[in-house]
Image (spheres, helix red, strand yellow):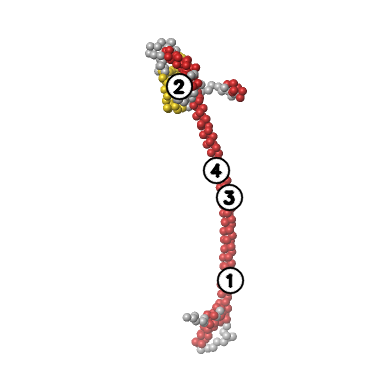
């Protein structure tokens, strides 16, 4: 089905249609009154057409002005958007640079933390070793237990255990490979001491008495045998046999030896040794 061709009116320009409609209305009015109209003597149609054209031109001008203004506003908005985009890009670049710096600083801090962790572990291990050697910390481990006591009828002045007897036993244990020693719960170290006070024995300024329990941490397979081969061990066991103390060394799979009292660990003075004097001290 084909479309109908456009009418002549549809093809007529808008201004011509406005003018023709005005003239037709004039002719119609004159014909109604029984007169005739001559375009030359009745210029009303021309005035109306001119007015319509003027109004139309005004509308076109206003539309053009408004379009220009809208274009200016659009251009200004576009410029603002571009400025914002550029500003955002700059802020993003700055934030990314700051993030990269923070990541680098964080990586460096993690490396330092790892290094410090290694140093701390090494220092802690060394501290435990030194603490065990000096008696400043409690220690546990396998070793031997030696118990003995003087006879009930023993003469306190001549047959009781004395400080020199315990010192001989302790020296023998050190020589046999003991790593830590205690007597009746008192840790033996360089700052403590074993001495007689009357007929009693003091260790770390605390009185200990019969029965005696000596704990020594070390290799239980060799510690007791090595003790018998030392000078101090031979001296002690000879006295024990003479006075009937009856010492009984026994292996122990797990012993706990406490730290020495704090008062015995306090240093009254200290002096740094150079290499030569350190060698002499050793």
Q: Quadrant of the C terminus?
A: top right
- In this rendering, the answer to whether 101 lies above or below 2 is above
- In this rendering, the answer to whether 138 lies above or below 196 is below
The residue to which callout 2 is attached is 224
Q: Quadrant of residue 280?
A: top right
Residue at x 61%, y 23% (from the top left corner): 276
Judged by depth in the image, the label closer to the viewer, 2 or 1, is 2
**Sequence order check, earlier mark of 1 and 3:** 1
The residue to which callout 1 is attached is 61
Q: Nearer the viewer, residue 223 or 217?
A: 223
Pinpoint residue 65: horizontal percent, then vertical percent.
Answer: 58, 68
Residue at x 50%, y 29% (from the top left corner): 128
Q: How many marks?
A: 4
The residue to which callout 3 is attached is 94
Please give the label number shown on residue 106: 4
Q: Nearer the viewer, residue 135 or 269?
A: 135
Binning the other alpha carbons within 10 Å of mark 3 as few (below 14), some (14 to 19) or many (20 upward) gives few
Residue at x 54%, y 34% (from the top left corner): 119
Element type at marker 4? helix
- In three-dimensional space, the C-alpha distance between marks 2 and 4, rounded to whole angstroms, equals 56 Å
- In three-dimensional space, the C-alpha distance between marks 1 and 3, rounded to whole angstroms, equals 49 Å
**Sequence order check, earlier mark of 4 and 1:** 1
**Sequence order check, earlier mark of 3 and 2:** 3
- In three-dimensional space, the C-alpha distance between marks 4 and 1, rounded to whole angstroms, equals 66 Å
Residue at x 58%, y 70% (from the top left corner): 64
Please give the label number shown on residue 134: none
Q: Quadrant of residue 237?
A: top left
Binning the other alpha carbons within 10 Å of mark 1 as few (below 14), some (14 to 19) or many (20 upward) gives few
């Amino acid at each position: 089905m084909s479309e109908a061709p456009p009418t002549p009116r549809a093809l007529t320009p808008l201004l011509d249609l406005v003018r023709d409609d005005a003239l037709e209305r004039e002719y119609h009015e004159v014909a109604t009154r029984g007169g005739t109209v001559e375009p030359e003597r009745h210029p009303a149609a021309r005035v109306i057409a001119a007015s319509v054209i003027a109004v139309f031109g005004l509308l076109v001008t206003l539309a053009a002005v408004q379009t220009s203004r809208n274009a200016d506003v659009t251009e200004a908005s576009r410029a603002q958007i571009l400025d914002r985009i550029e500003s955002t890009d700059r802020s993003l670049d700055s934030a990314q640079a700051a993030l990269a710096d923070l990541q680098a600083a964080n990586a460096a801090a993690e490396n330092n933390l790892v290094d410090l962790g290694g140093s701390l572990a090494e220092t802690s291990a060394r501290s435990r070793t030194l603490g065990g050697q000096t008696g400043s910390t409690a220690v546990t481990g396998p070793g031997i237990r030696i118990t003995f006591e003087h006879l009930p009828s023993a003469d306190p002045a001549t047959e009781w255990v004395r400080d020199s007897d315990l010192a001989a036993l302790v020296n023998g244990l050190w020589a046999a490979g003991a790593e830590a020693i205690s007597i009746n719960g008192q840790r033996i170290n360089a700052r403590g001491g074993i001495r007689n006070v009357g007929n009693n024995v003091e260790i770390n300024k605390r009185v200990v008495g019969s029965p005696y329990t000596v704990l020594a941490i070390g290799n239980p397979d060799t510690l007791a045998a090595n003790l018998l081969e030392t000078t101090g061990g031979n001296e002690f066991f000879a006295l024990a046999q003479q006075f009937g103390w009856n010492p009984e060394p026994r292996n122990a799979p797990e012993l706990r030896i406490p730290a020495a009292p704090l008062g015995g660990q306090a240093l009254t003075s200290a002096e740094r040794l150079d290499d030569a004097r350190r060698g002499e001290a050793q």
